[in-house]
Image: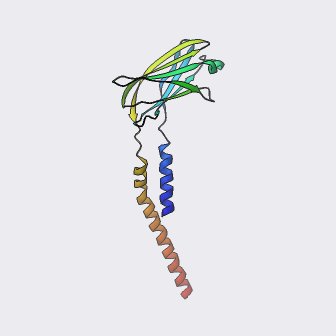
Amino acid sequence: MALAAAICLALADGAVAHDGPPYPIVSDRRAGPYVMSVWTDPDTTDDRSPGGQFWVTFTGDGAGGQSRDVHVTITATPLRGGSEQSVEAAANSTGSYFGALVLDHEGRFRIDVRARGSQGDGDVSAEVDATYDLRPAPFVVVLYAVPFALVGALWVKLLLRRRDRNTRLHDAD
């Protein structure tokens, strides 16, 4: 039983690390010398952690093989109250750029992506709805898992009791 509870706690922690899939807010839009796409997972957080995640990719004749000399800045401006947040996106091994911002409340945000590089400058904008992550809290996941763990423990106990009864009947013969 303790093992089942430990497994449930470990799985609940892993569940917090998973987000829903990102979705595109800009697809193959020409901006200056670049053709950019922007994907996002705009989660709102209360703990000031950067839950608003953004991926910027250059496609087609966009940044071509010179995408490493492009500097990408992502800015989120709330459309109702709050302060503007910006981040310099970092290039990753796939050639795309990643940046995470603090989106401190639910609602609409204007997202501005600025690309600056040796080929020139390009800007794209879009709006997103930031929402709280709708997954249950880890405690709730454990709470929901407890009845299944208890049923499993009862089932194992029943199997062991049957095995002991069959062993006694077999020994009596």
In this view, which residue lies farthest toward the left? 80
The spot of residue 69 in percent (x, y) is: 63, 18
Q: What residue is at 41 percent from the left and 46 percent from the top? A: 137
* Side of 91 where 23 appears, left or right: left
Question: Which residue is located at x 44 percent, y 68 percent?
Answer: 154
In x, y percent, where is residue 78? 38, 24
- Image coloring type: rainbow
Instruction: Name the residue at the bottom extreme.
Output: 173
x and y percent of residue 101 in the render? 47, 29
Q: Is residue 1 left or right of residue 104?
A: right
The residue lying at 46 percent from left, 22 percent from top is: 75
**How many numbered dots are placed on residues in this image?**
0
* Front residue of this view, candidates 104 and 147: 104
When the figure is inspected, residue 66 is found, relative to residue 5, above or below; the finding is above
Q: Quadrant of the C terminus?
A: bottom right
Q: Decide: is 66 above or below 137.
A: above
Residue 102 place in picture, x, y as percent: 44, 30
